[in-house]
Image (tube, helix red, strand yellow):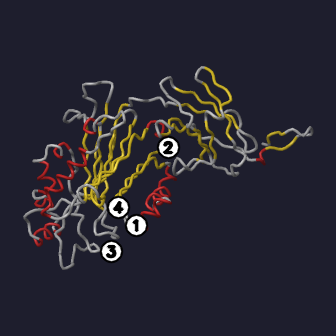
């Protein structure tokens, strides 16, 4: 991220350009932005398919600066802690200190970021008790001992295994007890740093920095299945949560940075601890753009509602929870309730005529998350209705 003062001020007032770009790309694929956190040049975004929204609760976002004795955010980590189908998941993006000789400082910052992920005032377990930690970013680990010529020749001949033995992260995992608990895929791609910008050439400047795998993706599972098993072998038969790495690659075609981007693709298998949404939403009757329309919703017994809860009306393909075309405060506009069934009216008269489908989402202020989502439906335009000889509206087919 551009962390200049004007960029920071602009991104505070408006949507940052990376969020806007990814929302444009992902919303047609039914992905919705559910959370983000930024610290100067670090940005972490979380998207989900809309059908998972009622089962994802954003618990906390946190920034941990480690630059300038812990006061400056040019180095450090950002974290989004969420509850996914009842499981605790932490996602961390980091930027650790650079240079070959600063490995001890990198490990110190790694441990500090992890230790600072306490969630005071929240009913959230310690991060080391979370079911999954995904940790990635510019970790800045370098290749020790070997000279520049040997490293470049090894890369040219794709003899990466010679370089693995001197990779500082792999070496550090044998010494640091916290780092040792994190897993990583095989480094079957060239070192991703440092390149001349707008090229695939490693650094040709006067400094001629030695290539290194600085950009890494790690993960830590609290519970592990037994070796060689693809099914649950966990002591607790009521839960199953496991992660499998599908791909771990770099992308040489991108050249706007002196790093090459790295992606990891995973399969997450789980047995939901929560399988029923807290709120069930239903649009009642035939919806048109002429009148206020009725919504029925029911609550599970353990859901604690708030006066600030609201229901939003969205077009299918929404980018973000704030993309509603209309909304209603549930307490202020409640028309009836009995035995857990509640009804409210929502204004649809200002909804533009469109052939798009719509969704209803219930947003919980206490949980800061969507806790209910309806099935897609259509709102009929004004032209769908005509008048009979008595002047009464009749549907046209």
Specify which label sits upstream in the sequence, 3 or 2. 2
Q: Which residue is mark 4?
A: 41
For discs 3 and 1, the disc positioned in front in the rendered view:
1
Which quadrant does the C terminus fall into?
top right
Q: Quadrant of residue 293?
A: top right
Q: Position of residue 143 (x, y in %)?
A: 13, 62
For discs 4 and 3, the disc positioned in front in the rendered view:
4
Specify which label sits upstream in the sequence, 4 or 2. 4
| Mark 3 and mark 1: Cα distance apart in space | 25 Å
Q: What residue is rendered at 20% in x and 56% in y?
A: 187
Q: Which residue is mark 1?
A: 5
Which quadrant does the N terminus fall into?
bottom left
| Mark 3 and mark 2: Cα distance apart in space | 37 Å
Q: Specify the label residue 50 is tagged with.
A: 2
Specify which label sits upstream in the sequence, 4 or 3. 4
Compared across the picture, whether 386 is left or right of 317 comes to right
Q: Which residue is mark 3?
A: 198
| Mark 4 and mark 2: Cα distance apart in space | 29 Å
Q: What residue is rendered at 83% in x and 40% in y?
A: 393
């Amino acid at each position: 991220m551009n962390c200049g003062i004007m960029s920071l001020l602009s991104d505070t007032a408006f949507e940052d350009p990376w969020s806007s770009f990814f929302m444009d790309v992902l919303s047609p694929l039914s992905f919705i932005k559910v959370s983000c956190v930024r610290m100067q040049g670090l940005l972490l975004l979380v998207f989900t398919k809309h059908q998972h929204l009622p089962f994802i609760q954003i618990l906390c976002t946190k920034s941990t600066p480690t630059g300038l004795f812990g006061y400056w955010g040019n180095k450090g980590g950002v974290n989004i802690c969420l509850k996914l189908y009842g499981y605790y998941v932490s996602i961390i993006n980091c930027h650790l200190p650079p240079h070959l000789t600063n490995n001890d400082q990198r490990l110190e910052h790694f441990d500090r970021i992890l230790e600072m992920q306490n969630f005071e005032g929240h009913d959230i377990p310690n991060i080391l008790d979370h079911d999954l930690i995904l940790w990635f970013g510019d970790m800045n680990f370098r290749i020790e001992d070997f000279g520049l010529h040997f490293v470049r020749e090894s890369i040219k001949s794709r003899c990466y295994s010679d370089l693995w033995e001197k990779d500082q992260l792999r070496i550090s995992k044998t010494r640091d007890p916290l780092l040792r608990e994190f897993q990583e895929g095989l480094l079957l791609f060239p070192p991703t740093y440092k390149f001349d910008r707008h090229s695939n050439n490693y650094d040709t400047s006067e400094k001629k920095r030695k290539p290194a795998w600085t950009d890494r993706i790690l993960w830590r599972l609290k519970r592990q299945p037994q070796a060689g098993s693809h099914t649950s072998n966990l002591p607790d038969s009521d839960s199953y949560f496991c992660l499998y790495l599908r791909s771990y690659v770099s992308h040489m075609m991108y050249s706007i940075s002196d790093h090459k981007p790295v992606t990891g693709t995973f399969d997450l298998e789980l047995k939901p601890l929560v399988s029923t949404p807290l709120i069930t939403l239903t649009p009642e009757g035939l919806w048109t753009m002429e009148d206020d329309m009725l919504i029925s919703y029911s609550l599970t017994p353990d859901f604690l509602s708030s006066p600030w809860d609201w229901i939003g009306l969205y077009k299918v393909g929404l980018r973000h929870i704030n993309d509603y075309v209309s909304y209603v405060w549930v307490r202020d506009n409640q028309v009836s309730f009995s035995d857990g069934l509640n009804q409210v009216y929502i204004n649809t008269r200002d909804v533009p005529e469109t052939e798009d489908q719509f969704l209803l989402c219930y947003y919980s202020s206490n949980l800061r998350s969507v806790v209910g989502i309806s099935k897609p439906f259509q709102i009929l335009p004004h032209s769908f209705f005509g008048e009979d000889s008595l002047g009464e509206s009749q549907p046209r087919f």
